[in-house]
Image (spheres, helix red, strand yellow):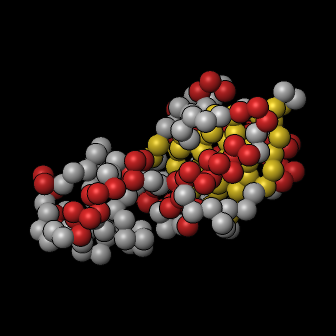
Amino acid sequence: MYFTALLARTDDGWEASDTELDDVESLDELAELARESAPDDETVLVCIEQEGAWFGLVRVDGEDDPRVYVSDAARAMRSAYGEILLTDELLGRRPEDDDVLDGLTGLDDDAGDGVDGVDEGDDDGGPAAAGREDDGDEGTGGQDVPRGPLGDPGLLTDLGIDAAVVRGLTPDDALSEIADALGCADVLEAVR
């Protein structure tokens, strides 16, 4: 079960609205949706939660690039919503890597172009899988993504929530704890 909401900062505090992401296909589209809900280019947080599995946060400040944090990238990749957040840039890939890797058949770990331990390829024996042991993580949509958190855990630091706190949140209560720290738990629960 999924829960998605937008939290928009206004002069009167935070306003929450539930949102449907079925028609959103990219992080750019998600950021545009967030911008449309914010008065005067204020901060908007897009909150996505898959019950008991993972949560994701996207922060949009005016026309700045969105900042993303995902609590468990491997689990999120199994979700259509997670695939929106897990961009090539966040995963440390260049878009042209997929084209190059499609034509290779025996890539070892040293030849990979991974960033921060991220291997390119897929989990079903594709190029990156050829040179590493099976990590037992099936069903990642053909993408090899790291287990655990990915992105910018400091995206809420200026709002009073440290990166260490964000990293320590569990999927079951993350959004409620964030909303509580921001002083908008009631408005988030009203749309839940």
11 lies above or below 92:
above
Of residue 153 and residue 112, the one placed in the foreground of this image is: 112
Side (left or right) of 15 relative to 64: right
Q: Residue at x 62, y 47 (%)?
A: 31
Q: Position of residue 35 (x, y in %)?
A: 69, 43
110 lies above or below 126:
above
Q: Position of residue 113 (x, y in %)?
A: 21, 51
| Residue 129 appearing in the image | no
Q: Residue at x 69, y 51 (%)?
A: 33
Q: Position of residue 109 (x, y in %)?
A: 16, 56
26 lies above or below 80:
above
- Quadrant in which the N terminus is drawn: bottom right
Residue 64 location, quadrant = top right
Of residue 85 and residue 164, the one placed in the foreground of this image is: 85
- Quadrant in which the C terminus is drawn: bottom right
Side (left or right) of 139 relative to 12: left
Q: Residue at x 12, y 68 (%)?
A: 106
Residue 185 location, quadrant = top right
Number of marks in the rendered image: 0
Q: Residue at x 73, y 52 (%)?
A: 5
Q: Position of residue 138 (x, y in %)?
A: 38, 72
| Residue 125 appearing in the image | yes
